[in-house]
Each structure stands twice: as C-alpha cells, then as structure tokens.
Amino acid sequence: MGLLPAGLEFNVIIAYVFGIILIYLIGRMLTMPIRLVFKLIYNGLVGGVMLWAVNFVGTYFGFTIGINPITALVAGFLGLPGVILLILFKIFIN
C-alpha cells in the first residue's frame, strides 16, 4: 500500500510533470520571437513617424534629416531614441 492510487506509478507522474514543463517552455520559446517582431514593427512605425515629423517641422527652420536606409534602420530599431540620436548627430556634424 503506497500513497499513490492503484495503477499510477511514480514514473508516470514524473513523465506527466516533465511533459507539462516541456510544453510550457516550448510555448514560451515560440511566443518570444513574436513579441520581438511586434516590438520592432512598433518601433519602426514610431521612428518613421517621428522622422517624418522632424523633417516636416524642420523644413521651416532649414533642418532636415535625409531619409535613407541607414537613418531608416536607426529610427526603426531604436524608435524615438534613434530619432533623437539622428538629430544630435546632425547637429554635431554640421
């Protein structure tokens, strides 16, 4: 007479627990890249809008940032901090 109900062995319970933990870990691994992709898309949209806004307002002051693959990547990956970095870079270069 053990603590387990009839027909259940300790190895079976360990296998079920291991399986549940494995399913959880696989689910976490699959959702992490999706979150990263959505974050990059969000940063890209915010960066692009901010880059456009800086160029729109900057034309009245004679200040524009050229939109090319490098500036688009910086603004896209970093978002608002990337646009600020581009503005500071443009100020200190000129």
Image (cartoon, rainbow, N blue to C red):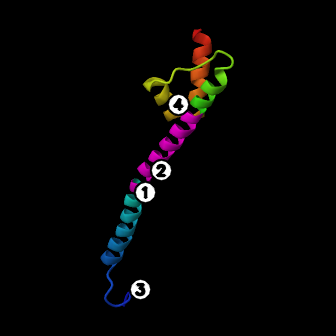
Mark 4, residue position: 75
Q: Earlier in the sequence, mark 3 or mark 4?
A: 3
| Badge 2 element | helix
Specify whether 57 is left or right of 4.
right
Q: Which mark is residue 3?
A: 3
Q: Earlier in the sequence, mark 2 or mark 1?
A: 1
Q: Please state the total of marks drawn on the protein image.
A: 4
Mark 3 packing: few (<14 Cα in 10 Å), some, or many (20+)? few
Does 58 sit above or below residue 28? above
**Callout 2–callout 3 Cβ contact below 8 Å:** no
Which segment did they paint magenta? 30-49
Could you tell me how far apart the alpha carbons at marks 4 and 2 are, in whole angstroms?
A: 19 Å
Specify whether 85 is left or right of 19.
right
Query: Label 4 is placed on what type of residue?
Result: Ala
Query: Label 3 is placed on what type of residue?
Result: Leu
Residue at 38 percent across and 87 percent down: it is 2
Could you tell me how far apart the alpha carbons at marks 4 and 1 are, in whole angstroms?
A: 29 Å
Mark 1, residue position: 28
Q: Which mark is residue 35?
A: 2
